[in-house]
Image: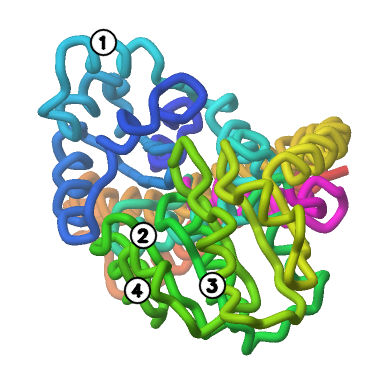
Amino acid sequence: MYGLSSIDLENFRTVAFTHKNLPLDLVGRFHLSEESKRQELQRLKQSLSLSELMYVSTCNRVEFLLVNDGASAPEVKDLLHFFAHDLSPDEEALALSQAEVYSGQEAVEHVFRVCSSLDSMVIGEREIITQMRTAHEEARAMGLSGDLLRLIMRKAIETAKQIFTETDIFKKPVSVVSLAFHRLRDLQVPLSSRMLIVGAGRTNKAMVRFLAKHGFENIHIFNRTLSKAESLAAELGAKASPLHALDDYTEGFDVLISCTGASEAVIDRERFDQLLAGERGKKVLIDLALPGDFAPSIFAQPKAQLTHINIEELRLTAEQNLAERSREISRCEEIIDNKMHEFHELYHTRQIELSMRQIPVSVKEIRQRAMQEVYAKDLESLNPESREVLNKIVDYMEKKYISVPMKMAREVMLKAKR
């Protein structure tokens, strides 16, 4: 009654396909392109009789935040039908069995945890809060979300911000790429440094984007498949060359970063000497490959002042930092618990507000029906003076009937906050 179904918490459900239970390539099958996103999501909302819908897609998770209209709750198989038509029977069965489904209060807490990065592949990564906020803004712009998702996301973002400022879970990097960049930054390498990047796979893509984001512009990418190097270079305004072009490269470098899938060293002593081009100054070598891309002979008789950053020492640091982050989880859980209590107070207050909003409308409807239908003939017999007095009485009664429950509701809300 009185519109409560539009904000019924029991009608809220989340369905998540994530890295925790599914291969990443299967998670990626639920990704929607920017071109089709609006049309597909609006079609999904209408088909499943949803009152609200929000869609989240990152590199390792796809989530649907669903508010149904009070009818039967949407099933995982309905989402599979809409977004994975080309799944094999085995893939469909895997996605169906491993999807994470939460309802009501558990769904709200799940959103808080996701937004705060406690559910991420790397606990404490910062990008998720922006991704969640952007997903909600898109849902609002598309006319997909409403009052309940607004309340949930408002409190979820607030929770993530508090965890970010009051705990150390975000402070120490735990990804190899992030650690490598921090080591490079600590060496105070000038932004004008000549950066040679060998390999254009996922790790080096992330590394190059870090470099470009922080102002490094002199970047040259070499890769066995030239088109991949060109695609990344075009994105960042860098140069691109095939891998074999390293043998003819004579312009020197300041930082050499390599990460390929080769089974043997890609940078041997001969190739390294060629790349040095006779220079003897400080050089930084970052090896993010496993096995390593730099031959040990490079460091036996160095012709330059080499700083070597390799993946093994980065991994050790990452493990130490991750352990420190994990110790912060209990504090994060405490914050989430407090925020859940605040959310329920906010939620119940909003229910009362929505209920009260309908009272003036309902009272006016009762008055109109009484005057125009139920007692219409009796009113016709009244003279103008009597009709005026009656209208004044009814006006007075109408205002009182509206104000009394409003006052009582405010008192209930104030007691609940004490």
Q: Quadrant of the C terminus?
A: top right
Residue type at mark 3 is Leu
Measure the alpha-carbon separation of dots 1 and 2. Answer: 38 Å
Magenta stretch: includes residue 260: no
**Secondary structure under badge 2?**
strand
Which residue is rendered at x = 64% and y = 37% of the image? 113
Measure the alpha-carbon separation of dots 2 and 3. Answer: 15 Å
Tell me the quarter of the picture where residue 312 sits.
top right
Mark 3 touching mark 4, by CB under 8 A? no
Q: Nearer the viewer, residue 291 or 51?
A: 291
Query: Viewed as shown, does residue 181 lie left or right of 252?
Result: right
Query: Viewed as shown, does residue 204 lie left or right of 113?
Result: left
Looking at the image, the residue that sits furthest to the left is 86
> On screen, 210 above or below 111?
below
Of circles 3 and 1, the one toward us is 3
Sequence-earlier tag: 3 or 4: 4
Mark 4 touching mark 1, by CB under 8 A? no
Indicate which disc residue 275 carries.
3
Sequence-earlier tag: 2 or 4: 2
In the image, which residues are magenta?
149-173
Which residue is rendered at x = 61% and y = 48% of the image? 295
Q: State the predominant SS element of the stretch in magenta.
A: helix
Mark 1 neighbour density, 10 Å: few (under 14) some (14–19) many (20 or more)? few
Measure the alpha-carbon separation of dots 3 and 1. Answer: 52 Å
Q: According to the image, label 2 marks what residue?
A: 223
Mark 2 touching mark 4, by CB under 8 A? yes
